[in-house]
Amino acid sequence: KRKRINNNSNLVLTDYNDFVLQNVTWPNILCNCGSIDNDGTNPDDLHDIIRLVSGDWMDVSEQHLQILPHKQQHGNDNAIDTHITTSSSRPGSITPVFETFNIVLASETTYTIQSCNQTALLLRRHLKPQAGVAYVATKRYYFGVGGGSDAFREAATKLQLRVDVAGVYDDGKSNIRELLKLQGFVN
């Protein structure tokens, strides 16, 4: 039985290739929760709470999940720009504000050193501080390209993310796989 979708939810699904999202992901969403039935779910409502975004994770982060300049509401309909600066910012510069998430799931995103660094940076930007959690499924080694769970752990800890091994999957015949659990940055 299908569950009613919580309209306060926000789901962002990404893939490097837009055709995967269009031809596989969206049809599966409609198949699993998109028909009008007893719970009142309407396929048109899905567009309000589910975003499909294609591209490299850094492009997705900067083009679709960045809120800049930050808008702050003050009890009326007028949005006021607030320029957020930090000690590492130049005076008067705008520090990007990123949309944050409670849960991030990722798979096969740590195959090179560069992809390890980008995945760690994306999680640093988009996990809710102290409340957010990410699960990254990865191979222990990606032979010949330098990525894998050790390289990703190193990249994530440099960005003050807490990394724990949630599971190790070793069938004795193929590459060892790990499920890593990451939590918001460590203070």
Image: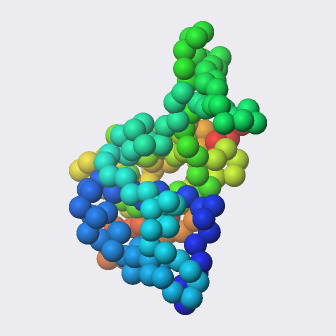
Question: Which residue sits furthest front?
Answer: 77
x and y percentages locating residue 24 in the rendered image: 29, 71
User: Going 58% across and 16% down the picture, which residue do you hit?
Assistant: 89
Closer-to-camera residue (161/96): 96
Q: The C terminus is located in which quarter? A: top right
Direction from residue 162 to residue 23 in the image, left or right: left
x and y percentages locating residue 127 in the rendered image: 59, 48
x and y percentages locating residue 70 in the rendered image: 59, 30
User: Going 54% across and 27% down the picture, which residue do you hit?
Assistant: 69
Direction from residue 9 to residue 113 in the image, left or right: left
Would you identify the image quadrant in which residue 140 lies? Answer: bottom left
Direction from residue 57 to residue 163 in the image, left or right: right
User: Going 44% across and 77% down the picture, which residue do you hit?
Assistant: 34
| Rendered position, 32 above or below 151 | below
Q: The N terminus is located in which quarter? A: bottom right
User: Going 47% across and 78% down the picture, which residue do you hit?
Assistant: 33
Would you identify the image quadrant in which residue 118 lies? Answer: top left
x and y percentages locating residue 98 in the rendered image: 54, 38
